């Protein structure tokens, strides 16, 4: 975490009405566009290493950067187990609508890659950078891998506490999460976000196999798509070389807007 980010308090942005209303923690850095929007992963937060690296880059280059925590994540309100993909997609669309009116660059990590592709259908991004994109992960990388006894527990009890290599706390995998995820699956049809896409994928990723990234590429258009495979890359892709690749990918899909020529 850089010192500037550590000192920057988040702003709470209201989203939704009624029983589902919550406030999302946001950090907005003003600057030149197109604005870059960070979409974090499952149980991650906006002050994680890759997001901090993008913030340092944005500060140095004078670029606009928007970060936020989904409901139940990080500094935002809510209990994690109470939310699903639909909620986190709504969070992303609300933040983009409020803080990134110009066509944004969406940078999605893991679950954020899925959210970015889903959001692209409405927000018309200028470019997408997807890091180990966990598209359809509730079905393809969770449910399909669960042994029968775990599936039975999820259906019977409504939740299964899954151990995590990234947190001392187990992750609640709810029946609502699994069932809602099926409403948003993308891999069964072509995917056209209408913009350049650069995918960064580690080949040593135990959570999102690199062949999963190939399935996504197969669904994307035949032009404007780059896949970078990092043979020794893990799921985090947070080493110095990985962060350099991330910044280069963001700059590559949508460079800063050029000032109009003088009359």
Image (cartoon, rainbow, N blue to C red):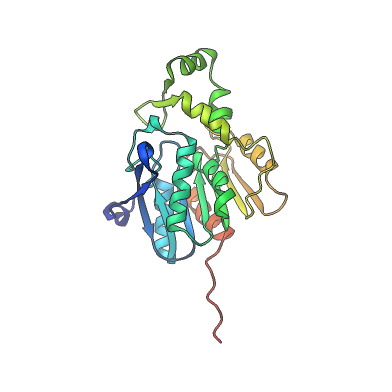
Query: Would residue 238 be seen by someone viewing this image from the given angle?
Result: no
Residue 69 shows in the view: yes
Q: Quadrant of the C terminus?
A: bottom right
40 vs 15, nearest the viewer: 15
Q: Residue at x 52, y 52 (%)?
A: 106
Residue 11, horizontal then vertical, whole percent: 31, 52
Side (left or right) of 79 relative to 175:
left
- Front one among 224 and 92: 92
Quarter location, residue 82: top left
Q: Is residue 112 above or below residue 160?
A: below
Q: Is residue 244 above or below residue 157?
A: below
Q: Position of residue 13 (x, y in %)?
A: 35, 50
The one nearer the camera, 62 or 202, is 62
Q: Count of labels shown?
A: 0
Residue 204, quarter of picture: top right
Q: Residue furthest right?
A: 222
The residue positioned 64% from the left and 54% from the top of the image is 194
């Amino acid at each position: 975490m850089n010192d500037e980010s550590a000192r920057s308090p988040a702003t709470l942005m209201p989203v939704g009405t009624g029983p589902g209303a919550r406030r999302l923690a946001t950090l907005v850095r003003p600057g030149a566009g197109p604005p870059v929007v960070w979409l974090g992963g499952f149980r991650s937060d906006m002050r994680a290493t890759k997001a901090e690296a993008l913030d340092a880059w944005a500060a140095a280059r004078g670029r606009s950067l928007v970060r936020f925590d989904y409901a139940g994540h990080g500094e935002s309100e809510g209990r994690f187990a109470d939310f699903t993909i639909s909620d986190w997609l709504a969070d992303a669309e609300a933040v983009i609508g409020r803080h990134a009116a110009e066509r944004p660059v969406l940078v999605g990590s893991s679950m954020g890659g899925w959210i970015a592709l889903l959001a692209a259908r409405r927000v018309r991004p200028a470019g997408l950078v997807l890091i180990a994109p966990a598209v359809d992960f509730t079905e393809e990388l969770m449910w399909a891998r669960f042994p029968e006894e775990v599936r039975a527990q999820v259906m019977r009890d409504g939740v299964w506490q899954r151990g995590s290599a990234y947190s001392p706390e187990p992750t609640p995998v709810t029946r609502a999460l699994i069932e809602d995820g099926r409403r948003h699956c993308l891999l069964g049809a072509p995917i056209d976000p209408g913009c350049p896409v650069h995918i960064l994928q580690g080949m040593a990723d135990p959570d999102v196999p690199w062949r999963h990234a190939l399935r996504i590429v197969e669904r994307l258009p035949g032009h404007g798509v780059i896949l970078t495979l990092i043979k020794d890359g893990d799921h985090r892709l947070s080493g110095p070389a990985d962060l350099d690749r991330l910044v280069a990918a963001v700059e590559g899909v949508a460079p800063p807007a050029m000032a109009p020529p003088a009359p």
